[in-house]
Image (tube, helix red, strand yellow):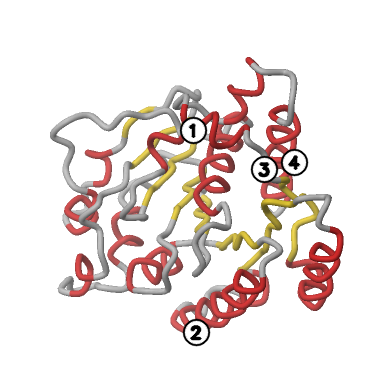
């Protein structure tokens, strides 16, 4: 059975793509054949996973509409990891004219059933028709959040909007659909960290125990076209090993949700 996870948040800059890339890579490293699907029009996931999309690739929007996602999937350097690269032309209008405008992605992924153990979807930092398609296709959603007032406000908006989307999916339990991961933690900002804890406390078990610290290892790994797991293996000093351990711990928690 394929498990599909949407990584989403209305606010940008909360490590959403970093979380999606490293969760997908972590699942692949755990032996799960995993597809990382990039719905962000900035198309950041493929280079972050070490993939250079080949020339002439069908635009992702067209592949979804025609239900030929298999034609755009590219293997990544990480064993068991595959990427459907992003498309700058993938905007809400790409789905608006389709007969199944809210479930086009779900139908397209259905054609890949059995080929992957997990699908991780990176979404744009918006709550539009593209994100609706991700939620309608997913079995669960992970919402990154950091210690920033706007991040917390947008987390609330994302929760509420996702719950509205789920009214169209009565087969799912809305209470267990969303989980939150705290990202970009800076231990020196104790007052802000305590403030964030207070705001997340009402969510209880919906917040993962793993917290991912801010680390220069993430942009450095991205600049080298590799995941932080591979970067840490080559740079055992500094914060890279901690970043890799934390992403690995988050992956273990996600696997524990199954």
Residue nearest the observer in this picture, 44 or 59: 44
Q: Could you give the CA–CA distance between mark 4 and mark 2, rounded to whole angstroms? A: 30 Å
What secondary structure is marked by label 4? helix
Q: Is residue 138 above or below residue 198?
A: above
Q: Which residue is mark 4?
A: 249
Q: Quadrant of residue 248?
A: top right
Sequence-first tag of 1 and 3: 1
What secondary structure is marked by label 1? helix
Q: Which residue is mark 3?
A: 251
Callout 4 environment at 10 Å: few (<14), some (14 to 19), or many (20+)?
Answer: some
Q: Is residue 22 above or below residue 87?
A: above
Sequence-first tag of 4 and 2: 2
What secondary structure is marked by label 3? helix
Callout 2 environment at 10 Å: few (<14), some (14 to 19), or many (20+)?
Answer: few
Q: Position of residue 174 (x, y in %)?
A: 61, 77
Q: Which residue is mark 1?
A: 222
- Residues tagged 3 and 4 counted as in contact (Cβ below 8 A): yes
What residue lies at 24% left-to-right and 50% top-to-bottom? 60
Q: Could you give the CA–CA distance between mark 1 and mark 4, rounded to whole angstroms? A: 20 Å
Q: Could you give the CA–CA distance between mark 1 and mark 3, rounded to whole angstroms? A: 19 Å
Residue nearest the observer in this picture, 193 or 56: 193
């Amino acid at each position: 059975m394929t498990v599909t996870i949407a990584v989403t948040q209305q606010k940008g800059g909360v490590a959403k793509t970093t979380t999606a890339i490293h969760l997908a890579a972590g699942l692949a490293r755990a032996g799960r054949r995993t597809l990382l699907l990039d719905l962000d029009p900035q198309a950041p996931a493929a280079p972050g996973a070490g993939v250079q999309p080949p020339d002439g690739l069908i635009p992702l929007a067209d592949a979804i509409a025609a239900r030929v996602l298999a034609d755009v999937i590219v293997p990544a350097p990480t064993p068991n990891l595959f990427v459907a690269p992003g498309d700058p032309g993938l905007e809400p209008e790409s789905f608006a004219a389709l007969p199944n405008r809210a479930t086009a992605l779900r139908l397209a992924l259905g054609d890949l059933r059995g080929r992957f153990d997990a699908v991780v979807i990176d979404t744009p930092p918006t709550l539009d028709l593209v994100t609706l398609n991700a939620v309608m296709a997913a079995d669960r959603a992970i919402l990154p959040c950091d210690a920033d007032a706007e991040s917390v406000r947008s987390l609330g908006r994302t929760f509420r909007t996702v719950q509205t989307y789920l009214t169209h999916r009565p087969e799912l339990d809305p209470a267990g659909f969303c989980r939150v991961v705290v990202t970009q933690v800076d231990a020196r900002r104790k007052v802000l960290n305590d403030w964030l804890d207070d705001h997340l406390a009402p969510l209880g078990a919906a917040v993962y125990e793993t917290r991912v610290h801010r680390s220069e290892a993430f942009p450095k790994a991205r600049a080298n076209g590799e995941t932080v797991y591979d970067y840490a293996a080559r740079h055992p000093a500094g914060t890279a090993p901690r970043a890799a351990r934390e992403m690995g711990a988050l992956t273990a928690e996600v696997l524990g949700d199954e």
